[in-house]
Image (cartoon, rainbow, N blue to C red):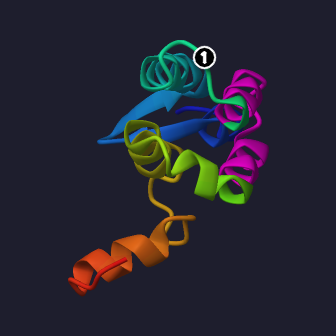
Amino acid sequence: MESPKIRQNNIESNMELIPLTEMAEQLDKLQSDESSGRGISCVKDIIGQLKLDNLDYARRTASMNHDKISNYPEVMMYIRDELFKGESDHPWKILDRLRELDMPE
């Protein structure tokens, strides 16, 4: 059985655990592609925290910068779907709710 510390530092995905460092690498590639190689500073902060195995701080950084991240749809979807996997309360919750109700944003 996996130790609690390792489980805490991973995100569960379809019965498969994704190491935070792998998530950081995928997010780094996405943000580089979407910003034409310039990078997105707030996303780089999230990547740095994931590399340090600090999931809580990475989530807080994403929450505080959700408006900036929303300008990059692929990055936003990855963060929402992977970083906040299994969380019912994420920064884009209201937008998801509006889409469910088929209301304009």
Closest to the observer, 30 or 59: 30
Q: Name the chief secondary structure element in magenta.
A: helix
Give the amino acid at mark 1: Arg
Q: Residue furthest top?
A: 37
85 in relation to 53, above or below: below
Mark 1 surroundings: few (<14), some (14-19) or many (≥20) residues within 10 A: few
Magenta highlight range = 43-62
102 sits left or right of 31 in the view? left
Closest to the observer, 71 or 92: 71
- Residue 9 percent location from the top left of the image: 65, 35
Residue beneath the point at 55% across and 19% down: 28
Q: Secondary structure at mark 1?
A: loop
Residue beneath the point at 24% across and 80% down: 100
- Residue 93 percent location from the top left of the image: 47, 72
Residue to which mark 1 is pinned: 38
Residue beneath the point at 71% across and 21% down: 51
